[in-house]
Amino acid sequence: MEDLTLRQNTLTTATRRAPATRLLEARRGPVQALARRALLSKFEHIAEGRFHLHDGREDRVFGRETPDFEVTASVCVKDPAFWTRVAFGGSIGAAESYIDGEWTADDLTRVLRTFVRNREALTGMEGGVGRILVPLQRAWHRMRDNTRGGSRRNIAAHYDLGNDFYATFLGPTMMYSAALFERADMTLEEAQTAKLERLCQKLDLRPSDHLLEIGTGWGGLALHAARAHGCRVTTTTISKAQHDYTVQRVRDAGLSDRIQVLIEDYRDLRGTYDKLVSVEMIEAVGHRWYDRFFGTCSKLLAPDGLMALQAIVIDDRHYDEALRSVDFIQRHVFPGSTIPSVGAITSCAARVTDMHLVHHEDLTPHYARTLELWRERFFASLDRVRALGFDERFTRLWEYYLCYCESGFAERQIGSVQMVYAKPRNRRAPILGRIPQHAAT
């Protein structure tokens, strides 16, 4: 088990409130009443989905169910500080208020989906006095830039919460990325294996290949590629917890002769590889470093190499806006992170590499289902989570995080894609529909 002091320090960082937000907690009386009226006025614009609100003074119903959004959600305000936290702190204030138990929901994912679905109608919740906090939030986020040292600190803040913690909801595969549900009745483990196999097939992996993986996770892809396709794998991470776990997992599988596990920054990698894969690691790169990331990937690939990238993405229309703001995940869950857009990825690859895009596949609905299953497992394992030393505020933060992400994918505010890039001399056949399995020899 990881060092308890490190885990508790990481926990404190993850749940700390923004300084400016703390100043608002003392506001009471007339300011609270004004904040309440302002937010209720905004809620009147909800057009899709029914939203019940109870705050001890009255019960209100906003919006209505529609044929394509038959969702009803309920919120109970437990502490009137909720009104000022949201009015002055926007979406981050709402999240912090939930973490502190100032409001509850009968189905948090439905509540958040309703707000996402009515995003345009609720425009302004981040405005007004709340804009005072934006420069402070952006300054804090810039301080978490993904230099070599910054990347290690940011990764530790999220992934070094402990392998035992992540095992409570990821399950045996220990895959922390979108699964692929090829059948509706697939288990999470089956769907994660299907995702891994699809990536390997897209790369046309063969026993003669040397595969480089940037972003090891807990070793699931490296193990699958070596077992199912017989290739050599070099995989790298900058999380000590993940590195040590994967090394042991590879040793236990008897694959130490085929899998090398590094603890190196992608910027320090050397050598030439036939294939390259990176699964949901680019979100931790940071937009200032995209040129360096893709340039490095291209230089590491052989002239006929292939690169497979699985990424969380945001709509191109909202990308620039997202770069100018800081959201709940960046503030409280994954410091230094940035979600790219497909356009940002393709323009960067075109500008700094000689690779060209040969395949793009959308997995967005599969991520919503993945998160739903993670959330169910997380709640079923709350006793284990608490036994690891995590308190009620932490469990509420992770509940909010999982539901926040699930609602974003369900409403396509964010997406999940697999993209394949080819070097100039690669002649891989087009990837159409299901890919025939290439057996290892």
Image: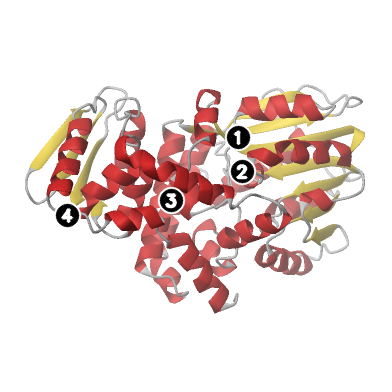
Q: CA distance from mark 1 to mark 2?
A: 7 Å
The reply to whether dot 1 and dot 2 touch (C-beta < 8 Å) is yes
Left or right of 322 in this view: 204: right
Work out whether mark 4 precedes mark 3 in sequence or the reverse, and give the earlier one: 4
303 or 6: nearer the eye? 6
Dot 4 corresponds to which residue?
Answer: 28
In the drawing, what numbered circle is on residue 340? 1
Work out whether mark 2 precedes mark 3 in sequence or the reverse, and give the earlier one: 2
Work out whether mark 3 precedes mark 1 in sequence or the reverse, and give the earlier one: 1
SS at badge 3? helix
Q: Amino acid at mark 4?
A: Arg
Q: CA distance from mark 3 to mark 1?
A: 19 Å
Q: CA distance from mark 2 to mark 4?
A: 39 Å
Q: Amino acid at mark 1?
A: Pro
Dot 3 corresponds to which residue?
Answer: 401
Q: What residue do we see at 26% from left, 57% from top?
A: 25
Q: Amino acid at mark 3?
A: Tyr
Dot 2 corresponds to which residue?
Answer: 283
Q: CA distance from mark 4 to mark 1?
A: 40 Å
Q: Position of residue 146 (x, y in %)?
A: 66, 50
How packed is label 1: few (under 14 Cα within 10 Å), some, or many (20 or more)? many
Q: Position of residue 392 (x, y in %)?
A: 35, 67
The reply to whether dot 2 and dot 4 touch (C-beta < 8 Å) is no
